Amino acid sequence: MAIATLMRVTLLDLDPAPWREFEVSLSITLKGLHDAIQAAFLWQDSHLWQFEIGDRCYGPEADNFLGMRTYKAGNMKLAQVRQAGFTDFLYTYDMGDNWEHQVQLLETRDSDASLPRFLAGKWRCPPEDIGGFPGFEMFLEAIGDPSHPEHAELLDWHGGPFERADIGAPEIAARMAGLAKARGRRR
């Protein structure tokens, strides 16, 4: 039995806003939470990322970039974040496209499930390297209009139609199960 937290992560600045709910162990590090968010949104983990919690930033490596200290995400556990009183913080993925996610820790509970575990979500997230919010709006416009001059090119680039309502739940669940299995092997 693990102590788990139910969380909701929402991709900001989009309407409608893609969101995911999933459960993770409180013993997970922020690096592990990053991996779970990547799985939940079907991101490809090919860009820089960071958490902003209070007045601190946590990322893949400890750094001092532009005078702003970044702490190593692998050294901070979610339990420590919760104990410090933080239940709402920011996760940014892809500093170029600047995809900001609101992370909310909803409730803590006992769980005997393999964690992390995907529970629910709505709206597909934008494709990688789309150019942030403006690029995504242009993409949606072009892909939704067969007469748009970039329709065929973007349809080919994306690999087919873009269905906003289809979040890819089976793939999300499979990626989360893979994380849970790897986490179980490390114990």
Image: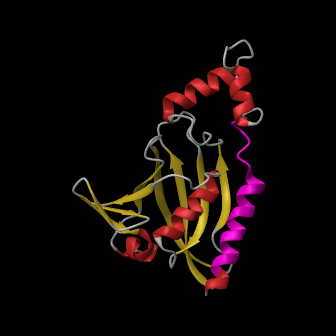
Residue occupying image coordinates x 57% and y 56%:
45
Give the percent coordinates (x, y) of residue 166: 74, 42
- Residue 173 is left or right of residue 3, and the answer is right
Viewer-proximal residue among 26 and 161: 161
In the rendered image, the residue lying farthest to the left is 67
Give the percent coordinates (x, y) of residue 67: 21, 56
Residue occupying image coordinates x 62% and y 40%:
127
Viewer-proximal residue among 5 and 98: 98
Give the percent coordinates (x, y) of residue 112: 67, 81
- Magenta stretch: helix, strand or loop mostly: helix
Above or below — where is 186 with respect to 100? below
Above or below — where is 11 with respect to 5? above
- Name the image quarter holding the C terminus: bottom right
In the rendered image, the residue lying farthest to the top is 147
Q: Quadrant of residue 88?
A: bottom left
- Name the image quarter holding the N terminus: bottom right
Give the percent coordinates (x, y) of residue 85: 34, 69
Residue occupying image coordinates x 48% and y 48%:
94
The verdict on residue 173 being magenta is: yes
Report the span colored magenta: 163-183
Viewer-proximal residue among 15 and 73: 73
Instruction: Give the tally of numbered discs.
Output: 0
The verdict on residue 34 being magenta is: no
The colour mode here is secondary structure
